Image (cartoon, rainbow, N blue to C red):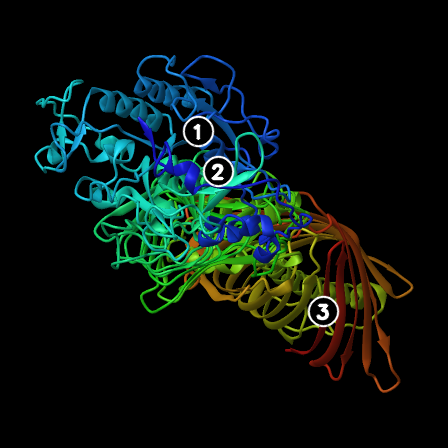
Amino acid sequence: MKLAVRGLTGALLASAAFFGPLPGPALAQTIGDPASFVTAEYLADHGLALSNAAQAYALGFTGKGVIVGVIDTGLDTSHPEFAGKIAVGGQDLLYGVPMTDRDGHGTHVAGTIAAARDGIGMHGVAFDARVIPFRSIRGRGDTETQLPNDVSATTRGIDAAVAAGARVINGSYGPSFYDEAYPNTAQMIGPSDAAEAQALIRAARAGVVGVFAAGNEYTDNPVINRNPTGSAFLPYVRPSNRDSGVYVTVDDDGDPTEANYDFSELEGMVVAVASVDRNKRISWFSNRCGVARNWCLVAFGGGAAGENQPSTADDVLSAKAGGGYFTTYGTSMASPHVAGGIAVLMEAFPGLSARDIVYILLNTAEDLGAPGVDEIYGHGLMDLGKAVRGPTSFAAGGFTTITVANGSGATFANDISGTGGLIKQGAGTLTLTGANSYTGLSQVQAGTLAVNGTVAGGVTVSQGATLRGTGRVDGGTLVAGTLAPGNSPGTLTAGGPVELTRTATLAVEIDGTGTGNGAGNHDRLIVTGTGGSFTAGGTIAPVTRGISAPATNSFTPTLGQGFTVVEAAGGVLGSFGGLTQPTSGLPAGTRFDAVYGSRTLTLRVTPARYGDIAAAGLTGTRNRNAAGGALDAARPVAGTRPDAAAQPVFDALYPLAGEAVGQALDQIGGAIHGEAMQAQLGVRRAVGGAIGDRLALLRDGSAAAQASAGLGRVGVTGRGAAALGVAEGGLTERGGAEGAGGDRAAWIRVLGSFGSIRGDGNAPGVKARTGAALVGADAEVARGVTAGLAVGYSRTDADARKGGGSVTIDGYHATLYGAASVGSAFIEGTAGYSFDRYESSRPLSFGGYSAVASGKADGHDLSASLTAGTRLTVEGVTVEPSAGLRVDRLFRSGFGERGAGLLSLSVADETLTAVRSTIGARANTLVTLEDGTEIRPSLRLHWAHDLADRGAETRAGLAAASFTTAGTRVGRDAALIGTGVSVGLSGSLALYADYGAELRRHAADHTVAAGLKLAW
C-alpha cells in the first residue's frame, strides 16, 4: 500500500510548507447567517469555501454526533485541534503500540475532516465530529518491524472502525502496482483487493460509507489512471465488466487468474474522490473518475502550482504531527474533505440511510467539465451547502429511493427537477420544501412524506404510509394509507384528482376555526382545477387533542359548529366507510358527522344521540327523545355519505345548535296527529252537549206545562218546535218561551267552538276551531218518554303550536237520544257514531330543509252518555242538579304521509278512549216585562272529571324505526261554566245568546252562542 500523496518519500518534504499556530479572530457565529462562519480559520482551508460549507454551518450542521474512521499512518493525539475529538477504540494495527504518527499524513487528513473550530489555524469540514484513528499504513520514519501484510492492516482497520461506531471511513491510500506483468494497460485485482472489498461490503451492510482517494498517478500512467485505483475502483469489479480490459485478476504473485469477482454491491456506498485546485480544475496529479464516474466526485486537493512543484498556500492546510500546521496536496487531501462533508450530511439527515446520503452528496455536486456526469470530474465538485438541503434532481427513467429511519426526519429544501420519481421508505418523515418540478411519481411506501413546497408529479401513498404538508401536489394523488393535510394544522393543495381507497384514512387536525397554518386553525385539503375531484374512501379521523406543536390543543368546538376540511373544484365523490371519533376535545354528548356537499366536505359537531339530546346539554322531552331515537336509527354511520333520502334531512340537522335541535325534533315527531284526535274528542262532546240542550229544552217545556196546570203559571205549548243557535261543548240552547214540549218536533242547531291546549312541556299543544250543524227529530213515544235522532256535520281546524302542523277534520255524526221523566226526576241518554275524515299538513322547516308532510286518514267514533237529575223550583227559580257519565271511543286508521321523503311518517292505527263524569246544576228563571216580553236567564256550573285517557298518542314509523309521541296531557278535572239569556218576542219566536267555558289545566274552551227558535 502507498499513500495517495504525490511523492511520498522525498517530494512531500520538499512540497510541504510548515506553519506554527496561526492566530484567528474570536469565534462568532449566527445560525442562519453563513457570513458569520466565514472567518480566517474557515478561509485557511480553501476547500471549505469551494464546497460552500458555511451554508451548511448556518443551518446548524457541523457533523456533531458523527464518528469518522481514519485509516492512515496514525494520528498525533496530542495536537490541540483534536482535544476532546478522538473517539475511543483507535488502534495501531501495524505495531500494536500507543497511537502515534511519524509520517504526519494521518494527522493532516484527520485535521481536514474534524479539526476543531477554535479560532486557531484552520478547522475541519466537520469540526464538531469526532475521529477514530487506525494506524494501518507505513509512512516515513516507520521501521520495518511492522506486522506482516499492510493490506491486511487496512482490511482490519475497516472492520475495527465499523465495530467502534464509525459511520464514515476515510482511506487516503492506494495500491502497490504489479507493473511487471501489466505495465500500462489495466489495473490488477488480486486476493488482497478481494479481502479489502469484502471488508468494505461488510461495512456497507452495516451502513458505513467508505471514502477513498482516487490516486495521484495520472502523470505516471495516464492509461490505467484515467480511472481511480485501489478501493475507489472496487465497485467497478463485477462479472459484466470482467472482459472490459480495464482490469485483470491476478494471484498473490501477480500471475493472471480466472477469478470472477463481484463487488458491485459497493456502488453507492463507496465514494471515489479526485482532486481539483482552487480554480476548480482537475489537479495535474489526480487520477480521473473514469469508469467510476457514477460514484466519483472531486474536492479540493491542491496542486495549483503545477506538476512536481512545491506546496504553496494555494494547497491544503491542516494539522501537523508534533504541532502546528502545514500545506500539501494530493487526492489524500481531497478525500477527507468529502469524508467530513458526509459527516455533516449524516448530522443533517440523521434518519436517512448511508446510501441515501451518498446519493444526495453526488446529486448536488457542482457540475464541472462536460455537462452531466463525465469521466474526468464524475458528478462534479462537492457542494456541501447545497447537499444539506437535499437532492436537486431525480434521474430519468427510474426512481430514487429515500429511506428515513423511524423517529427521524429529513428535509429536502432544494428545488428537485428531472423526469424521475421518488420512492419514500422507512418509518421516518421526509419533508419537501422546494419548488419541485420532477415529473415522476412520488411513491410513499412507508413513513411520512410532508409536502411543504410543490411537487409537479403525482403521489401514491401505500397502506401504513402518510402524506401531509402545507404545500401543493400538482399531479394526481392516490392514497391507500393516510392523508393528513397540514402540519399541526394547515392546508394542503392538490392540482389534480385526489382519491382515497377503502384502506385510506383522512386525518384532520382541528385546533380552531381558522383556515391558515398553525395554532388556532384546522386542516384542509384544497383540490383545484376542473379535473380536481376528491374521492372519499376508507375512514375520516378528526383529531382534537395530541396535535403536535404549534397547536394549542385547547380548542373545544361547539354543537353545530362546522369545519370544511375538503374543497374540490371538480366535485366531492365517493364516501368514507366510517369516522373515528376523537377520544377527547369534544363537548359532552356530541360527536363529529360528515356533511357531503357537491364540492365540499364538512365536519360538524352533532349530538351523539338525537334520542338523548339532554346529554349534549339540550332540553330533552319524552317526545323529542322518541322522535330522536327513530332518527338515530335512520342516521347514517358517522362519516358516511347519506343516501338521497337521508342527505337533505341530516345536512340540515347537523348545523343546528341550542333549542333549534329540539324544535326540529318536535316537528319531526308529528305530535299534531295525537293533538288532532284530542280536538276531535272535543267535537264529539260538543255534539253531545247540543243534544243535551235539546233534551233540556224538552224539560223546560214539560215544566211549563206542569206549572200551567198545577202551579198557576202560564206556559206556551205547541205540537212542535224549531231552534237556531250557536254553542260549543256543553253550551245549551235556552228556550225563550215555555211550551217547547209536544208529541213530535224537529230542530236544527249550529255550533261554534274555539279551544286552546297550551302544551305540557312535552307536546306542543293545539288551537282548534270547530263549526257544526245538527238537525234532529224526536217524539214522545210514551207518557214522559221521548226518543229522537240527530245527524250533523262538523269541520275542525286544529293547528299545533310552535309550527307543528295542522289537521282538518270533517265529521259526519248520527246520534240516538232519549229521555224519561217521573215527577221532577229525569234521566237522559245518548248513543252516537261519527265518521271522520282527517287531512293533515305538517310543515318541516329547519336548517335550510323545507318540506310539507301531508296525509289522509279515516276515523270512526262511538259515544254514549247517561245523565240523571231532578228539577227543583223555588220562588220562580228552577234548579236542576244532575250527574252524568259519558264514554267516547275515537278510532283513526293508519296512514302514510307523503311529500317529506325520509320524514314522511307511517302513522299507525290509533284509539282514544275517554270516560268523563260530571256533577253540577243548571238554574233558570222566567222574567216577564210589562209589554209581555219574556226573558229567561240561565246559569250552569258543573265539575267534570276524566277517568280514562287524557291525551292521545301517535305511534309512527320513520324509515324502519317505530316510535310513540304523546299529545298534551290535560288536567283530569275541569270547571264547566256558562250563562245565557233567551228573549221571547212572540208566542212562537224567541232570540237567545249564551256564553260557556270549560277550564282545566293546560286547556281552555270558550263558547259564544246566538240564535232563534220558532215553535208551532
Q: Quadrant of residue 331?
A: top left
Which sits earlier in the primary sequence, circle 1 or circle 2?
1
How far apart marks 1 and 2 lie (CA) works out to 9 Å
Q: Nearer the viewer, residue 457 or 295?
A: 295
Residue 953 spot, x, y in % from top left: 57, 48
Tell me the quadrant of the picture where the C terminus can be found.
Answer: bottom right
Tell me if 954 is positioned left or right of 95 in this view: right
Find the distance from the CA under tag 3 to the CA under tag 2: 108 Å
* Residue topped by disc 1: 70
- Residue at 73% x, 80% y is 991
Q: Position of residue 951 (x, y in %)?
A: 63, 49
Q: Secondary structure at mark 3?
A: strand
Amino acid identity at mark 1: Val
Q: Name the residue nearer the viewer: 932 or 150.
A: 150
The mark that comes first in sequence, 3 or 2, is 2
Relative to 706, is 863 on the left or the right? left
The residue that mark 3 highlights is 1007
Q: Residue 798 location in percent, x, y?
A: 59, 65
Q: Residue at x 11, y 28 (%)?
A: 181
Task: Answer few, some or many: residues within 10 Å of disc 2's Cα (few below 14, many 20 plus, some between 14 and 19).
Answer: many
Please name the amino acid that badge 3 sits on: Thr
Q: Nearer the viewer, residue 88 or 842?
A: 88
Q: Are marks 1 and 2 in contact (CB under 8 Å)?
A: yes
Q: Residue furthest right?
A: 875
Badges 1 and 3: C-beta atoms under 8 Å apart?
no
Figure check: 522 above or below 410: below
Label whose residue precedes the other's in the sequence (1 or 3): 1
In the rendered structure, which amino acid carries the disc numbered 2?
Answer: Ile
**Residue placed under numbered mark 2 in the picture:** 113
Q: Residues within 10 Å of mark 3 (few under 14, many from 20)?
A: many
- Under circle 2, the secondary element is helix
* 722 is higher (above) or lower (below) than 640: below
